[in-house]
Amino acid sequence: MNNQELKNIAREVRKDIIRSLHAAKAGHPGGSLSAADFFTYLYFEEMNIDPANPRDPDRDRFVLSKGHTVPGLYAVMAERGYFPKEELLTLRHLGSRLQGHPSMKDLPGIDMSTGSLGQGISTACGMALAAKIQNKSYRVYTVLGDGELEEGQVWEAAMFASAKKLDNLIAAVDNNNLQIDGPIDQVNSPYPIDEKFKAFGWHVIGPINGHDFDEIRQALTEAHTVTGKPTVIILKTTKGKGVSFMENQAGWHGKAPNDAEYEQAMAELEGTGDAQ
């Protein structure tokens, strides 16, 4: 798939994020939009998955460690064919399979229920270790928020992954520099992210432009060559990417657009012709 095709898909993903949040009147747009390009590349280019067989034991696994940004994951899964796109409008509704955090009990294709920050990367480590024990070739991918790196459990998992030489584990940090209370370097700085992961024995790639498909492709290609240690890719992104009034605004961490904001956001996403 060429870059323009990926950009077109990412634009549709962003539109569906806005649609679902507007219908729910709640949710997390900022981090969903910042990770949309990486989600798109994973699900359309990178991972060995089959929406028609979501429980294939040999499939690659994905764990959304920053589970609150699941509107972005739902949008890309719907685009990939896991469920009808119309179902996105049931986000956070009673009885819906699409709750505010991903649930593996409700929706086929969700590999882990997440929401408590710091826990997703730990379960990803467990999946990767299981593959090693069972001599399986699948990879495990996980996406963390940069504010999530303030959780101590992240670093316990990082230490474990290095100690067990989990070279089938690829983590990505969505480094948009904002969390619910403001810039991460002002709240409780996890910087320097690259040096910390290196100190824990990881192969570090980046920071790269998390909205550039060439850079994402190159990073994941490099990750495939790494042996004996886990890999982390640091994605420099823009919170709220693609919607002008949401970009780089901590206030859009966890609220839905009203009717006027919805119309403006959709007009921008329709009018750009480019998700970048």
Image (tube, helix red, strand yellow):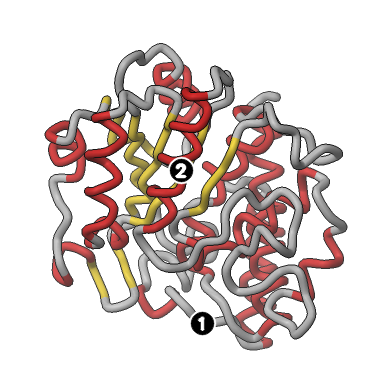
Which amino acid type corresponds to the residue marked 1 in the rendered image?
Lys
Depth check: give the residue in front, 189 or 183. 189
Q: Which residue is mark 2?
A: 124
**Residue located 40% across and 41% down the image:** 172
Relative vertical location of residue 37 with respect to residue 112 in this rendering, above or below: above
| Residue farthest along the front direction in this orientation | 133
Q: Secondary structure at mark 1?
A: loop
Question: How much space separates mark 2 and mark 1, taking CA atoms?
Answer: 28 Å
Query: Is residue 192 shown left or right of residue 80?
Result: left
The numbered dot on residue 255 is 1
Q: Residue at x 16, y 62 (%)?
A: 185
Q: Earlier in the sequence, mark 2 or mark 1?
A: 2
Left or right position of 59 against 241: right
Position above or below: 21 against 234: below
**Residue 11 location in percent, x, y?**
66, 51
Q: Nearer the viewer, residue 203 or 44?
A: 203
Name the residue: 43% across, 74% down. 253
Q: How many marks?
A: 2
**Which of the two residues, 55 or 275, is positioned nearer the viewer here?**
55
Q: Secondary structure at mark 2?
A: helix
Residue 266 percent coordinates (x, y): 68, 68
Residue 51, compared with residue 245, is above or below; it is: above
* Quarter of the rendering containing residue 61: top right
Circles 2 and 1 in contact, beta carbons < 8 Å: no
Task: Give residue 110's mark.
Answer: none
The amino acid marked with disc number 2 is Ala
Left or right: 57, with 116 as reference point:
right
* Image quarter of residue 125: top left
